């Protein structure tokens, strides 16, 4: 059975509380935009694609229950206001902001049609959010398969298997299913071309240790959990063929905002001549911003570092080896400035 971060049927939305993993697997009902905002902010649901999906689907649930209006203008204003509110929960990831703009515009266009009704506008918004869920899964599988094919062409052109290092959690738990960077690893494993995967612990909340390791064990993918500070040594001593990470936002010049620790991985990979890839859907691209300096970087509460386990019960899957532990003090995200395209690693 595939891991599901999001369970949705029309009028009903549930999310897997990822703060409880891997010790507990518990789904929480989300019946309103306010509840979705709180879950996103608290990181019960996380991952740029999943944030956008939960946000938009929570609005669909509200509209299904009759919220908004009366009147077309009031309903369109309600949709736009609720979406704008959702964007404030986690500002760095652009997927929610893009979805908010597109969904609000879709509602406005529907309301402008001759003979438009409130019911038609509600249905348009609900269907749009539902289509996002299906489209994200298709995109993830394409990213995984295309990424795996390209990586093999570059890192193993004569055949054989590859060793891949990844950071944070970019799998089924961060998306509608399958994943982006972790989707590439899944596709490599399905092709029989993955020798081994390394995943880093990753702040905040040790998402790599709790979530990525959990997914790798669940899928029976050969992998080892390492401390973030071990990544450069793994590149030297463990034959890492490539580094694949996800993205919260990619801007016009190629600068990429992703989980803190990504920048140092990019530097280490470049130093060792190892290809460094960002696997992300087009919904993570923000061409309105020119460089990474323009990206708003989220600051997390200090308690996530000063309190034991950040206030969480935490654990590591027992079959993951070796079960190492460390922490690093840093803000939530960092942005990576890539060299000019002509001089980039493939």
Image: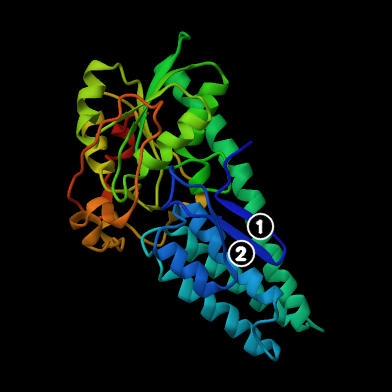
Q: Quadrant of residue 115?
A: bottom right
Q: Where 178 sits versus 102, above or below?
A: above
Q: Where 207 sits versus 98, above or below?
A: above
* Left or right of 296, for residue 146: right
Q: Where 289 sits versus 25, above or below?
A: below
Look at mark 1 in the image and give the residue it sits on: 8
Cα–Cα gap, marks 1 and 2: 8 Å
**Residue 259: x percent and y percent?**
32, 48
**Residue 229: x percent and y percent?**
19, 34
Q: Nearer the viewer, mark 1 or mark 2?
A: 1
The reply to whether dot 1 and dot 2 touch (C-beta < 8 Å) is: yes
Q: Quadrant of residue 291?
A: bottom left
Quarter holding the C terminus is: top left
Tell me, for residue 57, which label it has, or none.
Answer: 2
Q: Secondary structure at mark 2?
A: helix
Q: Secondary structure at mark 1?
A: strand
Quarter holding the N terminus is: top right
Residue 306 visible in the current orientation: yes
Looking at the image, which is closer to me, 5 or 256?
5
Residue 332 visible in the current orientation: no
Seen at 52% across and 22% down, the residue is 189
């Amino acid at each position: 059975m595939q891991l599901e971060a999001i369970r949705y049927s029309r009028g009903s939305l549930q999310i897997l509380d990822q703060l409880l993993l891997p010790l507990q697997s518990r789904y929480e009902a989300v019946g309103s935009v306010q509840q979705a905002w709180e879950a996103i902010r608290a990181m019960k649901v996380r991952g740029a694609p999943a944030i956008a999906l939960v946000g938009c689907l929570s609005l669909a649930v509200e509209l299904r229950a009759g919220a908004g209006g009366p009147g077309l203008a009031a309903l369109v204003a309600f949709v736009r206001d609720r979406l704008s509110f959702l964007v404030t929960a986690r500002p760095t990831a652009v997927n929610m902001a893009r979805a908010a703009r597109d969904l609000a515009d879709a509602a406005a266009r529907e309301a402008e049609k001759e003979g438009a009704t409130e019911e038609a506008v509600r249905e348009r918004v609900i269907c749009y959010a539902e289509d996002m869920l299906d489209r994200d899964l298709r995109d993830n599988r394409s990213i995984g398969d295309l990424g795996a094919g390209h990586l093999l062409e570059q890192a193993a052109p004569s055949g054989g298997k590859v060793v891949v290092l990844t950071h944070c959690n970019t799998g089924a738990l961060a998306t509608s299913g399958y994943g982006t960077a972790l989707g590439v690893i899944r596709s490599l494993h399905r092709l029989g071309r993955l020798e081994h995967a390394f995943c880093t612990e990753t702040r905040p909340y040790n998402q790599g240790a709790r979530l990525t390791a959990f997914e790798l064990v669940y899928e029976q993918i050969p992998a080892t959990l390492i401390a973030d500070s071990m990544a450069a040594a793994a590149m030297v001593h463990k034959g890492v063929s490539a580094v694949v990470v996800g993205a919260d936002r990619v801007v016009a010049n190629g600068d990429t905002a992703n989980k803190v620790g990504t920048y140092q991985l990019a530097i280490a990979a470049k130093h060792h001549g190892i290809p460094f890839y960002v696997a992300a859907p087009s919904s993570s691209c923000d061409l309105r911003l020119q460089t990474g300096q323009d990206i708003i970087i989220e600051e997390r509460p200090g308690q996530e570092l000063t309190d034991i386990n950040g206030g969480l019960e935490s654990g590591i899957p027992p079959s993951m080896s070796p079960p190492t532990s460390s922490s690093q003090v840093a803000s939530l995200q960092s942005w990576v400035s890539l060299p000019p395209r002509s001089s980039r690693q493939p």
